[in-house]
Amino acid sequence: MLHKLLHTLDQAVSFPVASAHCDIPCKIYDPASAQIATLTVIRMMDLIAEQDLSSLAGQANLSRLVAQKEEHVKMVKDEVRVIWGDFFKQPQFDQIPNAHEMVHNIMFQASKCSQGVDRVEGEKLLTLVNQFAEAFWLVKEVPTYRATCSYPPSMTVVYPKLG
Amino acid sequence: MANKYGFWRVQGNSMEPVIASGAFVLVCPCRGGGIGKLVLVDHPHYGQLVKRLKSIDEKGLMLLQGEGDDSLTTEQMGPVCSSRLKGRVWWQSRPISSL
């Protein structure tokens, strides 16, 4: 009866919800999102460098490009953090003993890409994210290869050899 | 640390059979301790969770555990700062379907 009373009250006032669920877990992890976000950061840096800041249109475009760069830097950090925090467990850390350092370096380098527009920093970020991707596929026992992505900024990306 | 008394609705089955999905729990402030007790935690990644308090180390980091097979594991939840402890479950209702 008390449960029924609370149920009625809940419908009226909406008690906060505490989760006792398993957050799926869906087991869908892929560093590709982090890699694409990194390529976007570099692409934004390239486009920023091309803007004519003497024109109003150029300045307007600059703000849009910087906003996208910021968003994708955050995306790189989020995607890497989720794989490191949710997918990597002790067996993976045993296999990749420098995983924590690798992730910290990505976070630090991503911040540099946020703070500036130097393409060199973007390239360094891609190097680190590619290393992270290689480590991820290594623990998944999936071989990888490197190829130039088919869209700007046309840079080398680590891909899994699936199938 | 814990906040205030309040009712919460539990969603999910990872604490079954101890707490059924759909049950209401009364959460009360507590001042730490309570190893082995059911607690409400504001997890930095998973949000508001009801779990059993497994341990607290000398740095104030808590380890949590679920009851059901589908629960997040202690390792998945990771150590959680005790400042994220919202309270202890003092009472729970029992949905008719779980009787």
Image (tube, coloured by chain):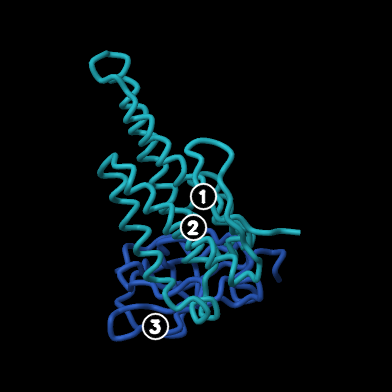
Q: Give the colour of chain A.
A: cyan
Q: Position of residue B60 (x, y in %)?
A: 30, 79
Q: What colour denotes chain B?
A: blue
Which residue is pictured at 47% across the width and 45% down the height? Answer: A37
The numbered disc on residue A130 is 2
Residue corresponding to mark 3: B34
Chain assignment, label 2 = A
Residue type at numbered disc 1: Thr
Would you identify the image quadrant in which residue B99 lies? bottom right
Task: Give the residue displayed 49% in from the left and 45% down from the top.
Answer: A155
Which amino acid lies under the numbered mark 2 shown in the image of this protein?
A: Asn
Mark 1 or mark 2, which has the lower sequence index? 2
- Residue B50 in the image, given as x and y percentages of width and height: 50, 68
Whole-angstrom CA distance, mark 1 to mark 2, is 9 Å
Residue at which label 1 appears = A156
Give the number of callouts.
Answer: 3
The tag on residue B44 is: none
Which is in the foreground here, disc 1 or disc 2? 1
Where is residue B92 drawn, in percent x and y? 53, 69
Is residue A53 toward the left or the right of residue B25 in the image? left
The answer to whether marks 1 and 2 mark residues whose Cβ atoms lie closer than 8 Å is yes
